């Protein structure tokens, strides 16, 4: 009886460890968090592409990412475009379906301290709706780089 108890305890411990390791990425999206250019992962870039249906150019580099959960998440991202992809990114923004009007242009901006109050040196802005997400995208020239600011949330 005692031996069976220890075997059951070991199975539960191993199962719990496996569950916690496999669920850690999923659990990340249950709390508010922010990534900088060192911690901005390829998974975060892929999440942005999947949810916005906006394909980023190869070599795009995440600079900032802010995630605000829970039920209707809000995502802010700042992504550096590789040199020479400005025109390609502009065409991709133009191709996105236009959202009528500018739904809550400043919605939730105060939740992300690095999101600009206004955009200067804009190349192109797009307000769109894709797969349940309202999307704002601003292609901007900042000093010697071109970046895209993307904000999306459910409506």
Image (cartoon, helix red, strand yellow):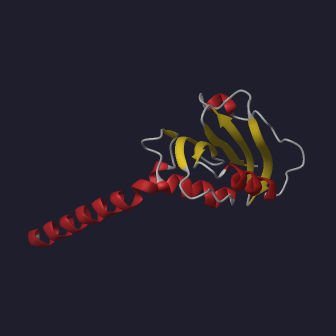
Q: Is residue 45 left or right of residue 110?
A: left
**Residue positioned 56% across, 59% down in the render:** 58
Rendered image quadrant of residue 13: bottom left
The single residue placed furthest to the right in the displayed view is: 100
The single residue placed furthest to the front in the displayed view is: 84
How many numbered discs, if any? Answer: 0
**Residue 32 seen anywhere in this rendered image of the structure:** yes
**Residue positioned 80% across, 54% down in the render:** 94
> How far from the left and from the top, in percent, is residue 142?
64, 33
**Residue positioned 61% across, 54% down in the render:** 48
Q: Nearer the viewer, residue 39 or 21?
A: 39
Q: Nearer the viewer, residue 52 or 74?
A: 52
**Residue 69 seen anywhere in this rendered image of the structure:** no
Q: Nearer the viewer, residue 25 or 63?
A: 63
**Residue positioned 40% across, 54% down in the render:** 24
> How far from the left and from the top, in percent, is residue 109?
68, 32
Q: Quadrant of the N terminus?
A: bottom left
Q: Is residue 68 left or right of residue 34?
A: right
Q: Is residue 53 left or right of residue 144?
A: right
> How far from the left and from the top, in percent, is residue 15?
29, 66
Q: Is residue 52 above or below residue 141?
A: below
């Amino acid at each position: 009886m005692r031996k069976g108890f220890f075997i059951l305890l070991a199975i539960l411990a191993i199962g719990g460890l496996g569950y916690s390791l496999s669920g850690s990425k999923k659990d990340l999206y249950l709390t508010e968090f922010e990534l900088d250019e060192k911690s901005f992962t390829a998974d975060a870039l892929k999440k942005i592409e999947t949810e916005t249906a906006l394909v980023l150019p190869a070599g795009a580099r995440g600079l900032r990412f802010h995630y605000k959960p829970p039920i209707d998440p809000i995502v802010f991202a700042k992504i550096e475009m590789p040199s020479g992809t400005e025109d390609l990114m502009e065409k991709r923004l133009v191709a996105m379906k236009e959202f009528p009007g500018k739904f809550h242009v400043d919605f939730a901006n105060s939740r992300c301290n690095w999101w600009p109050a206004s955009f200067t040196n804009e190349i192109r802005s797009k307000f769109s709706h894709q797969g349940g997400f309202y999307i704002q995208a601003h292609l901007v020239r900042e000093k010697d780089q071109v970046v895209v600011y993307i904000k999306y949330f459910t409506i």
